[in-house]
Amino acid sequence: MHRQTVRATRNAQDSGTCRHDRKGNPPMMTSFESSSTAPRHGSRATSIKLNALSVTFRSKRVLENISFEIKTGEIVGLIGPNGQGKSTLIRTLAGLIAPSAGTGTACGTDLGSGHVPESGIMFENPPFIDTGTGRYNLSFLARYSQNTVNDLDALMRHVGLDPSDATPVRAYSQGMRKRLGFAQALLGDPPLLLLDEPMNGLDPEGVHMMREELLARARKGATIVFSSHLLHEVERLCTRVFWVEQRGMQSIPHEAIEQKGLEMEYLERLGRRA
């Protein structure tokens, strides 16, 4: 693995949102720049596979004996109470936390191997260089992670930000920070998007923008895994939904969601827990 990629990965906790790539890959275009609508990351191949994977974080077992498989082009939602392991799972899939037991792969990369999958990551509260503008932050990360983007200004406009805005990020609203974090995750057109509460704090127009972008990328073959408490958006977007709680994961049957809706399913699971 190349040293630049290792540094970018280990700095992900500080940069908040990072785009992982392997040095030497050809430049890739972001989806809004591409005219092709055909799947570009394989047809229904396996994107993520976990086998009896467990994760211990800060001396606490957070996930235990997790097994599932996700195909390319799927949009998978993670729901459940706070503090139950959704964020830890996303960071593990990104290669930022090593499994303590079991095995897993993401985009052909073995998790825990010291290498990181090719992915775009958005944390729930992505920190930035607060004294810089939005464009400065986006440009800095593109250079740092060695991504080639044809037009950063177009990417910013695409997510609803003005590239000429001289406002420092420290003065951004929560919604503007979310838009900037999303733009960073999209750098380089990654085949895997890992998003932690991406829509929290967005206005309806921002939610619509993000929803349409995720659907467009899935149609082109990208795999998307995101956590959210906006259950109506999870229900609207996802091909599959997982309930994450008490170190485990359960797939929620489509029939249950269709019959009573995801919100009622969520509340009933909380009731069974009580």
Image (cartoon, helix red, strand yellow):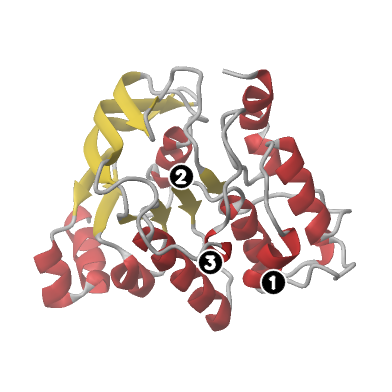
Check disc 1 and give the amino acid type: Arg
The residue to which callout 3 is attached is: 200
The residue nearer to you, when weighing 200 against 147, is 147
Looking at the image, is mark 1 or mark 2 earlier in the sequence? 2
User: Could you tell me which quadrant the C terminus lies in?
Assistant: bottom left
**Disc 2: which residue:** 87
Residue 36 falls in image quadrant: bottom left
Q: Would you say the residues marked 2 and 3 are in contact, meaning their CB atoms lie under 8 Å apart?
A: no
Q: Quadrant of the N terminus?
A: top right
Q: Residue at x 73, y 59 (%)?
A: 152
Mark 3 or 1: the one toward you? 1
Compared across the picture, whether 159 is left or right of 215 comes to: right
Rendered location of residue 122, percent (x, y): 56, 50
Which amino acid, mark 2? Ser
Location of mark 1 (residue): 157
Q: Earlier in the sequence, mark 3 or mark 1?
A: 1
* Residue lying at 31% horizontally and 19% vertically, measured from the top left: 101
Quadrant assignment, res 271: bottom left
Q: Is residue 121 left or right of 191 when viewed as pictured?
A: right
Could you tell me which residue is drawn at 58 percent across and 63 percent down? 33
